[in-house]
Image (cartoon, helix red, strand yellow):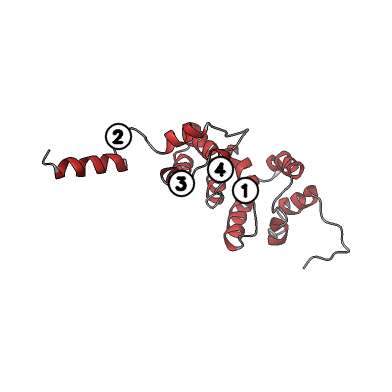
Amino acid sequence: MKDDNLPEATIEEIVASLSDLGQPLSNADLASLNDLKSDELASLKSLWPSIDEERRREMVSRLVTLAEDDPRLNFYAIFKSLLNDDDVEVRRQAIEGLWEDEESSLVGLLADVLESDDDTEVRAAAAKGLRHFASMAALGELRPVDVGEGEGHRDHHAVEEMLVPRHLGAPGTVEEDQTHRHLGDQGH
């Protein structure tokens, strides 16, 4: 429980505590990274490279677990910022942490990872992460206002084309299956 009389720790103090290899990771410190403001995220990003690589992996893994256990915790901004991390395991775990993020601007970020990441496992995780958005696009639930702006932004129609082939008979599409069933019914 938080004591209202105590001042909140700064992001620098939290990162210093989390970085201390002589201490176990604190769930309370990790949870305090919930829903960071843009200036706090910028500070975290600048301090991140100074943290030991194994500790960074452990931190991301624990953030994913905390978010899964408590849906009120929001580390999406952190996970998005880690999609370009130098460490393959951190990038893969960051994608895992974005699993429940339904903000469709994420499509562009995941597509960029899928197209450009050097690691096969990271690209596979990005492809898996795009499945949800493919379902939304196929059902017509991907709205233009949701596609986003800035980093990872793509035109709404480009996102839909990437996720759901629109031309009749494209291999593996619903249209192809329906076309073959219809033609089969006619004896063709």
> Within 10 Å of the Cα at label 1, are there few (<14), some (14-19), or many (20+) other Cα atoms?
many
- Tell me if I can see residue 183 in this picture: yes
Instruction: Name the residue beneath numbered marker 4.
Output: 91
Quarter of the image with the N terminus is bottom right
Q: Classify mark 4: helix, strand or loop.
A: helix
Tell me the distance, in whole angstroms, between the alpha carbons under discs 3 and 2.
Answer: 19 Å
Dot 3: what SS? Answer: helix
Identify the residue at horizontal 73%, vertical 53% (top origin). Answer: 20
Q: Which residue is mark 2?
A: 168
Question: How far across and down, in percent of the image, does residue 7 sit?
Answer: 86, 57
Residues under labels 4 and 3: Cα distance?
A: 24 Å
The amino acid type, in three-letter code, at marker 1 is Tyr
Q: What amino acid does circle 4 point to?
A: Arg
The spot of residue 158 in percent (x, y) is: 47, 31
Mark 2 or mark 4: name the one nearer the start of the chain: 4
State the separation of the CA atoms marked 4 and 1: 13 Å
The first of marks 1 and 2 along the sequence is 1
